[in-house]
Image (cartoon, rainbow, N blue to C red):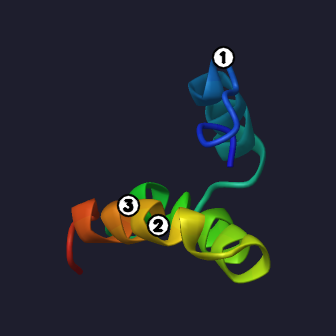
Amino acid sequence: MLRLFGCPRPERVLDGHQEVTPLARRGGARRRAPAVPLLVHAVLSGRGHAGQALAVVRSAPQG
């Protein structure tokens, strides 16, 4: 979400979060995460974000 909506330094936020509450290490989870809000927008606003969400999902590593 941070990257999707243009946070200027998302790595600082994620590093701080990792220090307090570590995120689970799952293959490609960070790369797939932007697909979730894009899919929500596609459902609520029409198909405009569907292609973008599919591209994010397809570019994530399998596993």
Of tags 1 and 2, which is closer to the observer? 2
Q: In which quadrant will I find the C terminus? A: bottom left
Residue tagged 1 = 8
Q: Amino acid at mark 2?
A: Ala
Q: Residue at x 63, y 29 (%)?
A: 10
Crowd around label 3: few <14 · some 14–19 · many ≥20 (10 Å): some
Badge 2 marks a residue whose secondary structure is helix
Badge 3 marks a residue whose secondary structure is helix
Q: Residue at x 55, y 57 (%)?
A: 34
Of tags 3 and 1, which is closer to the observer? 3
Count the labels in the image. 3
Residue tagged 2 = 53
Q: Amino acid at mark 1?
A: Pro
How far apart marks 1 and 2 lie (CA) works out to 21 Å
Q: Position of residue 4 (x, y in %)?
A: 61, 43
Can residue 25 be seen here? The reply is no
How far apart marks 2 and 3 lie (CA) works out to 5 Å
Q: Quadrant of residue 32?
A: bottom left
Q: Earlier in the sequence, mark 1 or mark 2?
A: 1
Q: Residue at x 24, y 61 (%)?
A: 59
Crowd around label 2: few <14 · some 14–19 · many ≥20 (10 Å): many
Q: Residue at x 50, y 72 (%)?
A: 50
Badge 1 marks a residue whose secondary structure is loop
